[in-house]
């Protein structure tokens, strides 16, 4: 069932001219993060008719991750391709050696 849904959605994967321009721009800008450029390239290949397996292999993504990014693109558009922030480990107090020495008011 899930495969049928993906196949149906991908058959209709059409990029708007604005989305296509954004994805192409990501390919050309040297400051674009590599992951974002890779996801954009995969979507451009899919929109041009390449299969998921071939596009994923060409850009260096697994099929599982490709489906994840396709789903996020279909839900949120180009904005969905950005990395989400990761929860960070809560840091405790700094080790004693790194703490600033206490200041004393001598007066």
Image (cartoon, helix red, strand yellow):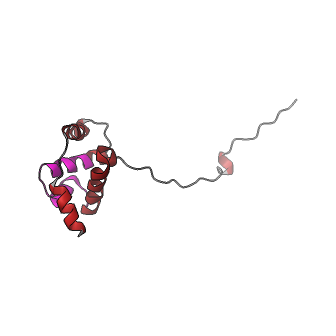
Residue, far bottom: 1
Residue at 21 percent across and 52 percent down: it is: 59
Residue at 24 percent across and 38 percent down: it is: 22
**Apparent side of residue 21 relative to residue 96 in the rendered image (left or right):** left
x, y (%) of residue 24? 21, 39
Number of callouts = 0
**Apparent side of residue 89 relative to residue 49 in the rendered image (left or right):** right
Q: Evaluate whether residue 5 shows in this view.
A: yes
Q: Evaluate whether residue 57 shows in this view.
A: no
The span shown in magenta is 39-62
Asked if the stretch drawn in magenta spans residue 40, the answer is yes
Q: Main structural element of the magenta stretch: helix, strand or loop?
A: helix
Residue, far top: 107
Image quadrant where one finds the N terminus: bottom left
x, y (%) of residue 32? 31, 39
Residue at 24 percent across and 46 percent down: it is: 40
Reply above or below: 57 against 33. below
x, y (%) of residue 71? 28, 56
Q: Nearer the viewer, residue 90 or 94?
A: 90
Q: Which of 94 and 49 is in front in this view?
A: 49
Residue, far right: 107
Image quadrant where one finds the C terminus: top right
Reply above or below: 27 against 55. above
**Apparent side of residue 85 relative to residue 15 in the rendered image (left or right):** right
Reply above or below: 17 against 39. above
């Amino acid at each position: 069932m899930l495969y049928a849904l993906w196949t149906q959605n991908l058959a209709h994967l059409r990029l708007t001219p604005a989305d296509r321009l954004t994805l192409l721009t990501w390919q050309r800008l040297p400051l674009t993060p590599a992951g974002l450029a890779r996801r954009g390239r995969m979507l451009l290949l899919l929109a041009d008719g390449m299969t998921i397996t071939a596009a994923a292999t060409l850009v260096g993504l697994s099929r599982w991750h490709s489906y994840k990014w396709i789903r996020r693109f279909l839900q949120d558009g180009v904005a969905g391709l950005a990395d989400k922030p990761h929860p960070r480990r809560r840091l405790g107090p700094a080790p004693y050696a790194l703490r600033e020495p206490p200041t004393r008011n001598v007066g």
